[in-house]
């Protein structure tokens, strides 16, 4: 065990302060709990209002058992929990706050290490941002995906089929009663979305980064092996404390390289881009949008999962999970990246096998040859925008179309189904005011529903452009994360209905076909300006004043970088 535990700064000695710290924590603990045994926090995002994480108290119990078995003291630490489906105006508004609150609680309390329990989209990113900032020995236990639900004999992809079925209702090809009837079938069990959405993606990327017990990510929430691995993670973290293996020793540039490869090979969520950029920013690692294109854009898609493919997360786990995927692209990985086990990530790949080649494809027969996230630039996105070709329509990846502009999400909802809306299948839907500052919080609205009259004509995809995000469960030819956003003075604020938008993914371009002098002479219209957020107080005010743009991870400017675990002053 480590010669000097951090918690000893609170508990050792015979003065008044040490007495207070020990006495108020006794409550059944023996005296030996304060003499050389590591105190491990369980940062627990369980909440009934975060339904995907509601089972994490049970997972925490298994973590606790593992900590105790290894000689540690387990301490439940409820932290801010963000429910993607419930929080308004968007869970992304609160990611930085959750990270900041968790960081401060870990730093301010007498703990030597931490197990991070997350699942729903923003919870794992927030926990990793916090752990990177405070730099105490840490490991992640992802809560796992739900089991596959079926409706009328057909598997339902959580999220992906919401988008698909709701469009069929609007297009008149699905009865509304049947749509409602599918609701109880979609969410079959505990756990997060069972598609390769943001929750699944961030669990997998946490493993690719080296912060998860290898082989654990993707284990379904009701699977007893999740509890077994949670127990083992509790044991492991006590060893991390003994070896002083901190996030800064695991989360390196090599780790982020491997995460980008994993993101592409699994067809992961576009939201991972802002989360990985934010986590890297907490570590002082210079990760940029260009790294995602350079490292990942030409990696083959090997995982045949919705929304880019056919299957669901239960199938992915059955087929072998992340490790056989990484084995197929082993030559693209950086072997220098370590995991919390102390071994390199690549050392865990030797025995990995795909047990279903239709779910996890071989390198020789990929789902798609090149499917990583592409980074676009041009006069419409000077600082970059992204698109997920794996989830787009190939015929739209090179496209010219007339812009149909919406000044806010309210404007969009008010007009999109107007039968008199001047729009056709070749139009480009442009939505602004949805970036970090403008909304605020960068909501998942970029995959705009298509006009009802076009759905009725059989149209199922159009080019869409937005400064917001889209759900990782979503699909379509969507250009998102446009930076700078409209509310930060980006050119998106200047687009007018009728302007021609030119998309060329192969050339990595997104442009407005308007002469530069004319574009410079334009100013945002009143409706656009009125749609921007203007909070007067509280977190929203702090957020709007300090949030960065999507191309840097949308973190707060004063939270970038690490502050470490040191607390210099006593509390009494």
Image: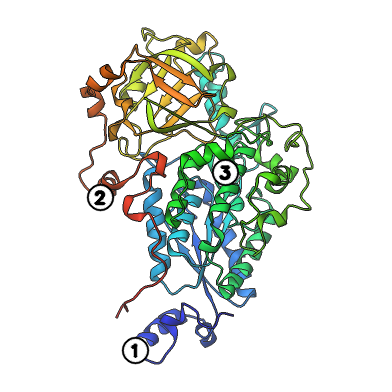
Q: Which residue is drawn at 54% across and 44% down?
A: 199
Which of labels 1 and 3 is toward the front? 3
User: Which class describes the residues within 10 Å of circle 2: few (<14), some (14-19), or many (20+)?
Assistant: few
User: Where the C terminus falls, by quadrant?
Assistant: bottom left
Label 2 vs 1, first from the N-terminus: 1
For mark 2, what is the residue? 538
C-alpha separation, residue under disc 2 versus residue under disc 3: 35 Å
Label 2 vs 3, first from the N-terminus: 3
Any mark on residue 16, and which?
1
Given residues 142 and 298, the one toward you in this image is: 298
C-alpha separation, residue under disc 2 versus residue under disc 1: 37 Å
Q: Which residue is drawn at 51% across and 51% down?
A: 124
C-alpha separation, residue under disc 1 versus residue under disc 3: 51 Å
User: Which class describes the residues within 10 Å of circle 1: few (<14), some (14-19), or many (20+)?
Assistant: few
Q: Residue at x 25, y 50 (%)?
A: 538
Q: Where is residue 300 in the image (x, y as percent from the top left)?
A: 66, 34
Which of labels 2 and 3 is toward the front? 3
Q: Tag 1, which secondary structure?
A: helix
Q: Residue at x 64, y 74 (%)?
A: 69
Q: Can residue 260 be seen in this view?
A: yes
The vertical placement of 221 against 234, above or below, is above
User: Where the N terminus falls, by quadrant?
Assistant: bottom right
Given residues 105 and 223, the one toward you in this image is: 105
Any mark on residue 260, and which?
3
Q: Where is residue 6 in the image (x, y as percent from the top left)?
A: 46, 77
Label 1 vs 3, first from the N-terminus: 1
């Amino acid at each position: 065990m480590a010669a000097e535990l951090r918690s000893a700064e609170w508990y050792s000695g015979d003065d008044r302060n040490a007495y207070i710290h020990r006495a108020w924590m006794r409550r059944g603990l023996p005296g030996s709990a304060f003499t050389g045994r590591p105190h491990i926090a369980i940062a627990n995002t369980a909440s009934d209002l975060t339904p995907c994480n509601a089972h994490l108290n049970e997972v925490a119990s298994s973590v606790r058992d593992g900590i105790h078995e290894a000689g540690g003291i387990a301490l439940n630490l409820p932290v801010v929990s963000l429910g993607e489906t419930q929080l308004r105006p968007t869970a992304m508004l609160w990611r930085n706050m959750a990270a900041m609150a968790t960081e401060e609680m870990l730093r301010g309390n007498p703990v030597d290490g931490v197990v991070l329990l997350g699942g729903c989209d923003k919870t794992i990113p927030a926990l990793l941002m916090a752990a990177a900032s405070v730099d105490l020995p840490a490991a992640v236990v992802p809560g796992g995906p739900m089991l596959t639900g079926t409706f009328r004999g057909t598997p339902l992809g959580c999220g992906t089929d919401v988008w698909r079925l709701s469009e069929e209702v609007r297009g008149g090809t699905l009865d509304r009663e049947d749509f409602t009837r599918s609701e109880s079938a979609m969410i079959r069990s505990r756990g997060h979305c069972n598609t390769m959405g943001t929750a699944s993606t961030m669990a997998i990327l946490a493993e690719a980064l080296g912060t998860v017990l290898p082989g654990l990510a993707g284990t379904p929430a009701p699977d007893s092996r999740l509890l077994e691995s949670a127990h083992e993670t509790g044991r492991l973290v006590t060893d991390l404390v003994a070896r002083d293996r901190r996030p800064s020793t695991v989360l390196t540039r090599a780790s982020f390289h491997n995460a980008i490869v994993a993101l592409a090979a699994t067809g992961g969520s576009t939201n991972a881009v802002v989360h990985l950029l934010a986590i890297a920013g907490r570590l002082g690692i210079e990760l940029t949008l260009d790294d995602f294109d350079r490292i990942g854009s030409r990696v083959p898609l090997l995982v045949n999962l919705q929304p880019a493919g056919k299957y669901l997360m239960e199938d992915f786990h059955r087929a072998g999970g992340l490790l056989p995927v990484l084995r197929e692209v082993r030559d693209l990985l950086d072997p220098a990246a370590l995991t919390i086990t102390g071994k390199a990530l690549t050392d865990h790949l030797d025995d990995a096998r795909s047990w279903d080649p239709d779910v996890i494809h071989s390198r020789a027969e990929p789902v798609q040859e090149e499917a990583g996230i592409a980074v676009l630039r041009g006069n419409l996105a000077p600082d970059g925008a992204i698109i997920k070709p794996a989830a787009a329509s190939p015929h739209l990846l090179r496209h010219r179309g007339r812009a149909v502009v919406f000044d806010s999400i309210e404007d969009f909802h008010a007009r999109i189904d107007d039968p008199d809306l001047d729009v056709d299948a070749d139009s480009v839907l442009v939505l602004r005011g949805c970036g970090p500052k403008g909304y605020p919080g960068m909501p998942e609205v970029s995959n705009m529903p298509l006009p009802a009259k076009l759905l009725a004509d059989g149209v199922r995809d159009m080019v869409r452009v937005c400064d917001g995000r889209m759900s990782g469960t979503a699909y379509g030819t969507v250009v998102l994360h446009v930076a700078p956003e409209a509310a930060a003075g980006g050119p998106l604020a200047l687009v007018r209905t009728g302007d021609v938008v030119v998309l060329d993914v192969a050339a990595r371009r997104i442009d407005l076909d308007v002469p530069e002098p004319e574009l410079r002479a334009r100013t945002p219209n009143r409706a656009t300006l009125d749609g921007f957020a203007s909070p007067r107080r509280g977190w929203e005010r702090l957020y709007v004043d300090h949030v960065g743009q999507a191309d840097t991870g949308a973190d707060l400017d004063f939270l970038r970088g690490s502050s470490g675990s040191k607390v210099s002053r006593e509390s009494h």
